[in-house]
Amino acid sequence: MLDHFLEITASQPLLQVLIVILATFVLEDAATVITAIQVHLHTISIPVALIALYCGIVVGDVGLYGLGALAAKWPPAQRWITVPSAQAQQSWLNKNLFKVVFISRFVPGTRLPLYTACGFFRAGLPVFTAATTCATFIWTTALFMLSLRIGGVLLAHLGAWRWVGIAGFVIVIILMGRLVARTQKHKM
C-alpha cells in the first residue's frame, strides 16, 4: 500500500514525506525497504526518501520516550519510581544513556522497553534524541542502501514476480530481526 501512495503522490514530495513518516510508525524496516524500491522506480527521490525515513524514525523513538514519561505520571506506576533499586537504575541509565540508546538501535527487540523506560525515568531527552538520531542515520542508511541494491536486482530480474521477491526480502529482514532478538533473549 505504501508503494501505491508514493506512486500517486510522485509530484508532491511533501505529501510523500508525510506518507513515509506515517509508514515508519507502523513498521520501520518495511517502510525503509519499500521506500528504497520506490526510489528505484523513480516515484520518490533519494533525499526526500532518506529525510522522511530519518524524521519518521526519530519522531517515533521520541514518541516512545513520551509514552514512558506519560506512564510515569500514572499514580499506580509512580510507586516504581520510589523503589530503592530504581534510583540506582536511573543513575546508571543517565550515565550510560547515549551509549545504551545508540546500541539499542542495532539490537532487535530492545527499543520499545528501553525507550519507554528512558521516558519513565526521565533520562535526558536531548541526549536520548541525539543518540537515536545518530544511530538512525547509520542503521537506516545502511538498510536503505542494501534495499536499494537488492531492490534493483529484484526489479531487473523478476519481472512480474518482482513484488513477490520484494515481499520476501521484507519478510526476511523482519524475521532476521526477530531471530536475533530471540537469540539474545535466550542468552540472557
Image (cartoon, rainbow, N blue to C red):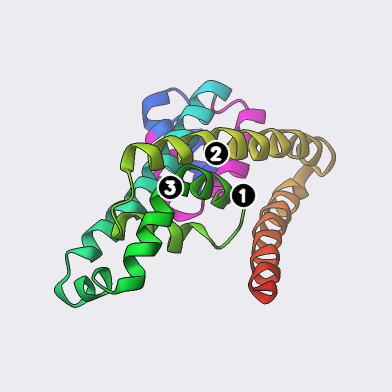
User: Dot 1: what SS?
Assistant: loop
Q: Position of residue 15 (x, y in %)?
A: 37, 31
Residue labelled with disc 1: 106
Q: Is residue 161 left or right of residue 55?
A: right
Give me the C-alpha separation between circle 3 and circle 1: 20 Å
Residue that lies at the very extreme toward the left in this rendered image: 75
The percent coordinates of residue 183 (x first, y second) are 71, 70
Label of residue 135 in the image = 2
- Rendered view: 75 above or below 34: below
- Foreground pick, 102 / 29: 102
| Camera-nearest label, 2 or 3 | 3
At label 1, which amino acid type do we have? Answer: Phe
Type of amino acid at the residue the image marks with label 2: Ala
- How far is disc 2 from disc 1 in space, using C-alphas? 8 Å
The amino acid marked with disc number 3 is Lys
Query: Magenta segment, which residues?
Result: 18-44
- Residue 12: tell me if it is visible: no
Q: Is residue 131 above or below residue 47?
A: below
